[in-house]
Image (cartoon, rainbow, N blue to C red):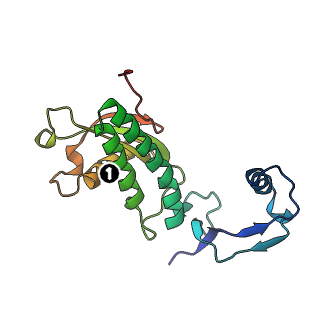
Amino acid sequence: MTTYNVHIYREMRLVFGGIEADTHEAAAAIAGDKPTDQADSIDDCDGETLAALVDVAGDEDYRHTRAIDFEPERERKAARRLLDACRMVVAGWERGDLAEAARACSAAIAEAEMAGPHAEASDPATKPYSVLLLYPDYANDGGKETYYAFVEAPDSVAAIADARRQAVAANDGAEIQPDDFAPLLVTEGHHYGQPVSNQ
């Protein structure tokens, strides 16, 4: 059995009294910039546990350190991608093409649901990738049907594997295998589609 050192990141309530500001938002911003030790009181207030950083005891290079996001943090990270997907829906609706936006929504949902609290922890060394996959011939309408995924992976090869798993999850009920999706493009970073015309 392995011995671990676990760092827990949890919500807490800090009270800063006597802040002068023009608005509620400005007061909140001022307090948010203050260090913890300047708070008038500190209360854990049964706050949600957001994430954990887990070190292997004796691993001085931290090569085996893993970051684990709990449900509140996974939802927070997913919210940004879902918001971006919603914006794509609005833009796609205006252009009369919702296919790409629907795929982005499916990818965001699949990513949000992919990892549970007891799933294998993610590697802090991962990077964001955008992966474009081509559907297999037997499931491709007209030969141009693609799946676009945002993933976090240590390299491009792993990014393709993650994107393929996302694609299968987004096509729940269809008899498609991950390796049936052909990779067309892999780029580092999350890149969103932009309008190609003013119509």
Residue drawn at 46 percent across, 43 percent down: 84
Is 140 in front, or is 186? 140
Residue drawn at 28 percent across, 39 percent down: 99
Residue drawn at 83 percent across, 66 percent down: 39
Left of 95 or right of it: where is 40?
Answer: right
Q: Is residue 162 visible?
A: no
| Label 1 SS | helix
When the figure is inspected, residue 132 is found, relative to residue 22, above or below; the finding is above
Is 71 in front, or is 14? 14
When the figure is inspected, residue 123 is found, relative to residue 3, above or below; the finding is above
Is 39 in front, or is 168? 39
| Residue that mark 1 sits on | 166
Left of 65 or right of it: where is 173?
Answer: left
> How would you rate the neighbour count of disc 1 (Cα within 10 Å): few for under 14, some for 14-19, many for 20 or more?
many
Q: Is residue 95 visible?
A: yes
User: Residue 114's spot in the image, x, y percent?
Assistant: 38, 59
Amino acid type assigned to the residue bearing label 1 in the image: Gln
Residue drawn at 85 percent across, 69 percent down: 40
Res 41 → quadrant: bottom right
User: Residue 66's spot in the image, x, y percent?
Assistant: 54, 61
User: Residue 36's spot in the image, x, y percent?
Assistant: 80, 63
When the figure is inspected, residue 40 is found, relative to residue 187, above or below; the finding is below
